[in-house]
Amino acid sequence: PKNKHFKMLVVADGVGGYDFGGEASRYATQTMLNWFESLNKKYYYDINLLQSQIINELKKINNQIYS
């Protein structure tokens, strides 16, 4: 985001050794980064709301990878 005080670190692990595991990791990290950059700024100031949004997005990405 434009406010440089907010950072996101994404680590995608647990798909190594599977066919296309590297691609799945890249997809997960890039999708999460894109989501974070487009996130409504109101979420940055409410940790509980931000946490629930992160969990929802991770579930969505996981479902996309495994479908």
Image (cartoon, grey):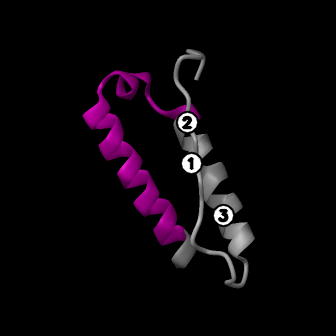
Sequence-first disc among 1 and 3 = 3
Residue 47 horizontal/vertical position (percent): 31, 31
Residue under label 2:
8
Q: Amino acid at mark 3?
A: Ser
Which of the two marks, 1 or 3, is nearer to us in this view?
Answer: 3
Please state the extent of the stretch shown in magenta in the rendering. Answer: 37-64
Who's the residue at 59% across and 65% down the image?
13
In the image, residue 49 sits, relative to residue 14, either above or below, namely: above
Q: Are marks 2 and 3 in contact (CB under 8 Å)?
A: no
Q: Is residue 59 magenta?
A: yes
Residue to which mark 1 is pinned: 32
> Residue 58: image x %, image y %?
45, 57
Q: Select label 1 or label 2 by which is in front.
A: 2
Q: Which mark is residue 25?
A: 3
Which three-letter amino acid code belongs to the residue tagged 2?
Met
Q: Distance from label 2 to label 3 (Cα)?
A: 16 Å
First-in-chain label (2 vs 3)? 2
Position of residue 62 in the picture relative to residue 13 (left or right)? left
Binning the other alpha carbons within 10 Å of mark 3 as few (below 14), some (14 to 19) or many (20 upward) gives some
